[in-house]
Amino acid sequence: MNTDDQTISAPILDMLTVANEYCYFLENVEQKKKEQVLMFMQRILPLLYLKGSLLPSIEPEYPEADERFVTQEKWEVLFTDLRKIFGEEDEFLIIDPQYINDTEPLKASMSENLADIYQDMKDFILLYQRNTHAARENAVHDCEKLFGSHWGFRIGNVLGRIHFMLHDETEEF
């Protein structure tokens, strides 16, 4: 085994492990109760964020080996399952600095954010599992770039809401 191969380093293998746990849970979410989902997310999302922040920056030698796997249909099924679980509590307000008016709250969706994170994690896992050096490089590259532009931010969006839903004294499960 080539010990200089950065694509099989501990930070990447740790990220794969946590991403796989996240995806596995969501692929079976229709069987879960809201409190189970919230408690799992409260624990896994900070881990995902931490592991994502530790990913190395890898420039793929063969960017044409990049692939995406999660279809719009798969995303929508997960989104719908989550929406059923969260019901009226799915929507909440956020301030998003990516938009021009970064002082006006925007409507956000727990289900949409969690499904978006799932899509990025599942694509990362499946591309990495192609088990070629080029595929692994692209998987890590995409995951690290999407952490900065996409899924890392979404974790930040939902964590506060999850905390409130779990610890609000007026909330009933």
Image (tube, rainbow, N blue to C red):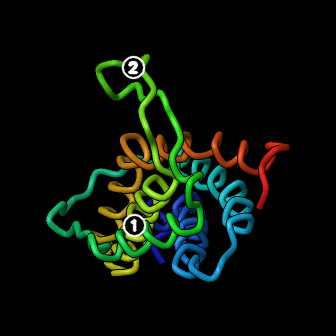
Q: Sort mark 1 into few (<14), some (14-19) or many (20+) by Cα contacts within 10 Å.
A: many
Nearer-the-camera pick, 20 or 164: 164
Q: Residue at x 45, y 64 (%)?
A: 118
Taking the spot 65% from the left edge, 59% from the top edge, the residue there is 41
Disc nearest the viewer among 1 and 2 = 2
Q: Which residue is mark 2?
A: 102
Q: Give above or below for 13 relative to 94.
A: below
From the image, which quarter does the C terminus lie in? bottom right
Q: Which of the two residues, 59 or 4, is positioned nearer the viewer here?
A: 59
Where residue 2 sits: x, y (%)? 45, 72
Give the answer, above or below, for where 55 lies relative to 14: above
The single residue placed furthest to the right in the displayed view is 169
> In x, y percent, where is residue 113?
46, 52
- Where residue 136 appears, x then y in whole percent? 36, 69
Mark closest to the chain's N terminus, 1 or 2: 2
Q: Identity of the amino acid at label 2?
A: Asp
Q: Is residue 4 above or below residue 50?
A: below
- Where residue 39 sits, quadrant-wise, is bottom right
Q: Secondary structure at mark 1?
A: helix
Crowding at dot 2, Cα within 10 Å, few <14 / some 14-19 / many 20+, comes out as few
Amino acid residing under circle 1: Phe
The CA span between labels 1 and 2 is 30 Å
Q: Determine the secondary structure under disc 2.
A: loop
**Would you say residue 111 is visible in this rendering?**
yes
Left or right of 3? Residue 131 is left
Q: Which mark is on residue 124? A: 1
* Residue at the (65%, 39%) spot, across then down: 160
Where's residue 55, x and y in %? 49, 51
